[in-house]
Image (cartoon, grey):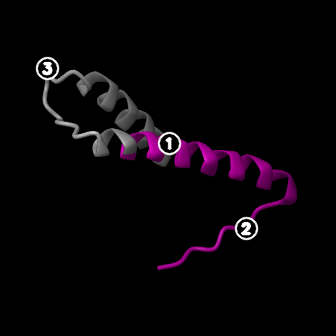
Amino acid sequence: MRTKIWLKPEQLELYIKQLERFRDLYSQLDQMLEEGFQFKAGAPNFQTMLSVSMQLQAKIR
């Protein structure tokens, strides 16, 4: 299902910045997963992954 988004010219720059932030957060998440991440408490990168996941979830909403 496609949704069209109608933006005013002054909104376009902000929308592009939001997309870039989403891309950057997703890239960080993807990089962590490629490094053999184990999502379990006590793992060395658990807190970082949890933090990035929560940021990504907040940006999606």
- Which of the 4 quarters of the picture holds residue 21? top right
Which sits in the foreground, 52 or 35? 35
Q: Residues within 10 Å of mark 2 (few under 14, many from 20)?
A: few
Q: Name the residue at the bottom extreme.
A: 1
Q: Position of residue 32 (x, y in %)?
A: 33, 38
- Is label 1 in contact with label 3 (beta carbons under 8 Å)? no
Q: CA distance from mark 2 to mark 3?
A: 45 Å
Q: Is residue 33 magenta?
A: no
Upstream in sequence: badge 2 or badge 1: 2
Q: Main secondary structure of the magenta part?
A: helix
In-front residue for pair 20/38: 38
Indicate the secondary structure of the residue bearing disc 3. Answer: loop
Q: Which residues are magenta?
A: 1-30
Between residue 37 and residue 55, name the one nearer to us. Answer: 37
In this rendering, would 21 be left or right of 55?
A: right
- Label annotation for residue 59: 1
Q: Amino acid at mark 2?
A: Trp
Please tell me which residue is depicted at 73% across the width and 67% down the height of the picture.
Answer: 6
Measuring 66% from the left and 68% from the top, which residue is drawn there? 5
Where does residue 23 sit, x and y in percent of width and height?
Answer: 54, 49
Q: Name the spot of residue 47 as percent of width and height, x first.
A: 28, 22
Compare marks 2 and 3 and give the one earlier in the sequence: 2
**Badge 2 is on which residue?**
6
Q: CA distance from mark 2 to mark 1?
A: 20 Å
Which circle's residue, 1 or 3, is located before the other in the chain? Answer: 3
Circles 2 and 3: CB distance less than 8 Å? no
Q: Is residue 36 visible?
A: yes
Q: Nearer the viewer, mark 2 or mark 3?
A: 3
Circle 3 sits on which residue? 42
Q: Amino acid at mark 1?
A: Lys
